[in-house]
Amino acid sequence: MSLLKSLTSNSSAFNLKPTQSTMAHSSSYRVLLRAACSSSRSTNSIGLFYSRGISSVKVVSIPYVSYYCTYSRDNLCSSKRRSRGPVMAGKKASEGIKQEDGKYKHTVDLPKTTFGMRANSSVREPEIQKIWEENQVFKKVVEKNSGANFILHDGPPYANGDLHIGHALNKILKDIINRYKVLQNYKVYFIPGWDCHGLPIELKVLQSLDQKARSDLTPLKLRAKAAKFAKETVKKQMSSFKRYGVWADWNDPYLTLDPEYEAAQIEVFGQMALKGYIYRGRKPVHWSPSSRTALAEAELEYPEKHISRSIYAIFRVVSAPLTPSSLLQEFPNLCLAVWTTTPWTIPANAAVAVNPKLEYAVVEIKSLLEPDPASGGKNKKGRLGLVLEDEKKPFLIVASELVPSLEAKWGVKLVVKKKQLGSELENYRYIHPIDDKECPVVIGGDYITTETGTGLVHTAPGHGQEDYVTGQKYGLPIFSPVDDDGKFTEEAGQFSGLDVLGEGNTAVVKYLDEHLSLIMEESYEHKYPYDWRTKKPTIFRATEQWFASVEGFRHAAVDAINHVKWVPPQAENRISAMTSCRSDWCISRQRTWGVPIPVFYHLQSREPLMNEETIDHIKSIITQKGGDAWWYMTVEDLLPSKYRDKAAEYEKGTDTMDVWFDSGSSWAAVLGKRDSLSYPADLYLEGTDQHRGWFQSSLLTSVATKGKAPYSSVLTHGFVLDEKGLKMSKSLGNVVDPRFVIEGGKNQKEAPAYGADVLRLWVSSVDYTSDVMIGAQILRQMSEVYRKLRGTLRYLLANLHDWKTEYTVQYHELPRIDQHALFQLENVVKNIQGNYENYQFFKIFQILQRFVIVDLSNFYFDVAKDRLYVGGSTSYTRKSCQTVLAAHLLSIVRILAPILPHLAEDVWQNLPFQYITEAGSVAEYVFESRWPISNERWLALPAEEINFWENILELRTEVNRVLEVARTGKLIGSSLDAKVHIYTSEASLASQLRELCAAKNDSDRLHRLFITSQAEILPSLEDEHTVTIPYSGECLIQGKNKVWIGISRAVGSKCERCWNYSQQVGSFLDHPTLCSRCYGVVGLQTPPQVAAVS
């Protein structure tokens, strides 16, 4: 079997057919490729790569990203200083540059290719994408693949604006995985989706209308405008995703506004309701006055520096349980001291909670401490209340541990009079500071601590989750005198109509102070929940809402998490913690643009009507007519026939579902409804914020209805920051727009058009498991890496312009250097495959950067140029090298393809031969060629041979160092002017080096590896001859074998054709300026037409 047959298959035939004309400037899209299935895994180590001695290439270093670096002692003897005489002479001649003597230029085999050095991505990438689209490449390749299905379920981005760099990171990661799976023979089905309902879109519509248009807006008109806006946004975002090079079923995406999707969502809701997981209740929820709707936890943001008006207030104790040691008997003017950051909730106070395990103290306010004169008589930390100026100061109950800090904060002397546990304070009663009703002291939970405050907690069950739980235990009233706009209702009495976060807060504080119930008021900086859409503060407010009872299936949800593979592994801990302690899910929203909650209310009793019959009937209507039907159809038509005679007794609800319920039902609406898909999905992939968003909502709906998670694996990525690690914001001017990265800015010099592949290369380079960075400098580095990758592939293409299958040299006949090159290649392919399987793309970037840019370019390619250019067109040495180059080209282009698909296709279009698949057909596209099949023979290079090449490469570095010294001393110019002399007392190494000097294959000879004209191994250093060697140095190979290196002028005359020095130059009468090798080549070669690389 030929070497190239074994390249991609261990048993099946594999042929490479030359195209009719490699010189013809044919269409850019002539032929492309795809890889053979291989599921083998390997470790991520690339420890077997021996590429020391690279002296002229720097591995790109990006902040917080580490790379495999090639060993180099210092930057000496760059490849630009190596001998390139024949190549440059031939190239200059082909370009019309006059040479002193160019009679042999036509015998030099110059590289030739139509593949451009410049990517011209602004033009080339859209051309390639057009070919993919017109020829339905994704669909055709998937249809041909015979492996299992692979389903990466797309989390729907929100259809309300332009894409940002986070979207690019997300979709490109997905595309890299999908394209790799395509190469691995999987049937990949990727359905892109969009989240189209919800408040942000509704607000966009309202903002686009004037006041009159808003007043004329009916729910149906609003829904029509919102749907139009969402669909237009989907088109724009889809166009951007396509430009990133993302493959997907763009003709049939899923939109949460599609009738089929809405019906599936209604079905999920119905199943949960029938299992008893959906209920209606009056509970405190996050409420956004700015949006006039309830919010889920995932719809909140927590800015760091919110300033609240916090107060220390006192409530007068009026009674105590009948015990012998009642505190009221000793301290008649006794008060409870509480602290709150929400004074506006005091009107709704129903109790004061204490921690039963904490020790509390009765303290007497003895005296005010002298204020600092510079403060103008005011406490520097806040404003003290009038009660501290009263002659008859009250006794206060506070946590004992907090007495010193309260003294300092209030500026008073507190004398402890008595102590007792919190459990003893239960059922004490106090007078409400505003409405004079009696309220109890109750036992709270672990949320009562001594970190801040007084150790006693003002409890308003209508305005807090913990307060609500405590209130349920004691049967406290759920009082919430606040309306949808965040203003006090008439139930709040004198505060009615005031904004609770503004003047209402101020009024309550003033009232408390005037009635001697305020110790102190101060500003308090802390995190506070904001509406993520309007960027304004929210409140906790008890309202009638629909909830999903997570408690009913919490254990099953946590158990399902344990059966999912999480990448990175620590993500499991995060979602487990969130799920195990989360409260019930508020799923109702008081908005118009969404999927209706399918419920009817009895006009008199307000009892909801919702059962299997009503839900199924509404589902069938929405399937046919969409969600709008809920708004334009009558109650009679919406009810099943069984209830129509009672239609006049009911009205339909106006709430819509939380958008997280929308997207959280996608597993049912997409995976469960499309023939090509399957449930659960193989992979979900989104940002780390989705642990409390889509990952969790999908988990809850799936576990509640199906008993298992909707995904087998979940991969999460971090956020994108600027180069300094700062969050991007327009105000800072550090936003990186993916469109500008691809297309460039107005000033192309400052903001060049990098193209999609450079953006994709950046995605592959970062460790996405934490936050990642991007900016101008990083993009420039990525562009440089891309340029070098492209240059390497161009080198391969150009030097295979005349290669044919029949030129293939069998593996056992290859020179040692070529066998080692194939070992390195196969090791790289195996390592990269393992990293694709583990989704560790940044390691692939590292390996590729080292191997392609450093190991190949600075050693193998550097050495190979001599035999490629001047070895003779049909020579064994050139054929063996081309055999290895073809193997590298076909492997590298495929392992690169998932990350850089445009570059891979561009290379494939310019292949000078056709690639024949195992099925015997021509691979027209790179993704038809499949992943390279593992070649165990190449990997089976003996350990001693691997170690030998490590020694050679290290020795080559040291030789280069001494050559550079000789060049600096003007002894030589080109390295071909030199002869290398080596001595080592280590017998084994000396023997190996002598073998190379006398190698049967010219390619393996030591002077070829050093790119010098001669090399010799000295028997000793005592010979008089060594004294005349002008430059020398010593080194340790592998830290133990001492080697002496000497450099002298090469002996003989310089060959006019190859520029090597030889004593045979002048021996041939018809070609007196040639060495014996070139004489043999010229004698066999007829003058061809010269064409350099275009």
Image (cartoon, rainbow, N blue to C red):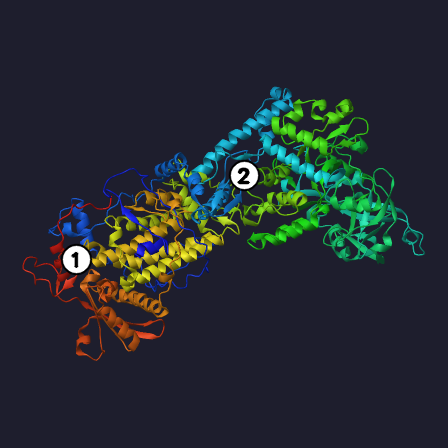
- Image quadrant holding the C terminus, namely top left
Above or below, comparing residue 615 to residue 1081 in the picture: above
What residue sits right under mark 2 in the picture? 675
Q: Position of residue 590 (x, y in %)?
A: 68, 31
Depth order, front residue of 998/810:
810
Q: Position of residue 121 (x, y in %)?
A: 36, 40
What residue sits right under mark 1 in the picture? 1058
Q: Answer with the quarter of the image where residue 947 lies.
A: bottom left
Q: How many marks?
A: 2
Q: Nearer the viewer, mark 1 or mark 2?
A: 2
Above or below, comparing residue 1044 to residue 851 in the picture: below
Disc number placed over residue 1010 in the picture, else none: none
Count residues near mark 2 (Cα–Cα under 10 Å), then give few for <14, some for 14-19, many for 20+.
few
Residue type highlighted by circle 2: Asp
Q: Position of residue 29 (x, y in %)?
A: 33, 39
Q: Is residue 59 visible?
A: no
Above or below, comparing residue 149 to residue 1055 in the picture: above
Residue at the outermost bottom position? 1022
Residue at the outermost left position? 1069
